[in-house]
Image (cartoon, helix red, strand yellow):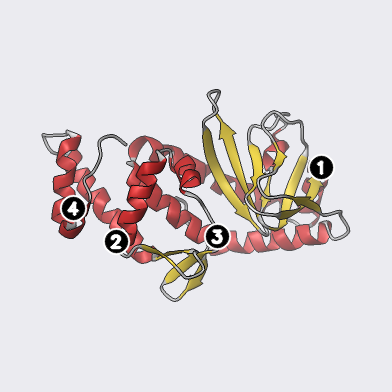
Amino acid sequence: MIQQTPQADRFKQQLRESLQHETLNSRAVKIARHANVYTCGDQDEMVYFIESGQIKLLILSPEGKECLLAIHSAGDIFGELCLSGLGSRLETATAMKATILKQIPSSQFLARLSRDSLLEGFVRYLAVRIADQQQVIANLVTVDSEQRLGKTLLQLARTLGKKDQQNTRIELKISHDELSEMVGTTRPRISLFMQRFRNLGLIETNLDRFLVINEKKLTDYLARIAIAAGHHRGSRDDSFQTRPVIRQRLFPKLAERHIESKGR
């Protein structure tokens, strides 16, 4: 995943202030929980600014399988792919909770960026988004599902989380089904890995039922299993059956509780 830089954070704050000013007298659009802002195939030339709530972006396969691309929260924009001139929407935007949006026509959006000298920053912002998506694609091909889940949780912590001493709290209820859509694996495997992370003290659920993530511990854990996986791939026996042996050496107590299932 791509780390956010202070420069990127400053631009996002400048963009939010600019769009708040632009939409000051615009009509707010209220979206109920689970309702769609737009769906794949819609003709829509609007960029959307989130005043409150959360929006998830999904792509559906011809078989109806969902892939969750991103989650956006207050102060974020989405729908900027309309600037590409492709016409139809390629994804579906759905409210994860009651959400209030402002709509900005694409031409008006670009004019505002130009007036506030934000066009260059917006190009950089889009480049980072593209790099982030490329990293996600690479992870789907090269990284196993446990590591993908860990990386996804870290990304959610950094984009949606609130810092609290050593931990980061995510005040958004994200289901195991939604995590499976983001990670590209089954819900039972998500549940297995989440329980493993809890047993290791990498994550926990607080009294408000918010997910709390220890970013340092989770990052260190992912680094260790990545090294172990690299050593395993370099060995003569590349069968998945040897994977539990690696885990047992690294985490003997955990190995007693869980047996790694086959496949990704």
Residue placed under numbered mark 4 in the picture: 255
- In the rendered image of this protein, does residue 200 appear above or below residue 128? below
Q: CA distance from mark 3 to mark 2?
A: 24 Å
Mark 1 and mark 2 lie on one chain; the one further toward the N terminus is 1
- Numbered mark located on residue 107 in the image: 1
Q: CA distance from mark 2 to mark 4?
A: 11 Å
* Left or right, residue 136 beside residue 252: right
Q: CA distance from mark 4 to mark 1?
A: 57 Å
Mark 1 and mark 3 lie on one chain; the one further toward the N terminus is 1
Query: Does residue 44 appear in this view?
Result: yes
Q: Mark 3 and mark 1 in contact (Cβ < 8 Å)?
A: no
- Numbered mark located on residue 160 in the image: 3
Res 142 quadrant in image: top left
Q: Position of residue 14 (x, y in %)?
A: 70, 62
Q: Secondary structure at mark 2?
A: helix
Kind of residue sitting beneath label 1: Ser
Query: Does residue 4 appear in this view?
Result: no
Q: Mark 1 and mark 4 in contact (Cβ < 8 Å)?
A: no
Disc 3 crowd rating (10 Å Cα; few below 14, some 14-19, many 20+) is some
- Residue at point 50% right, 45% down? 178
Residue placed under numbered mark 2 in the picture: 199
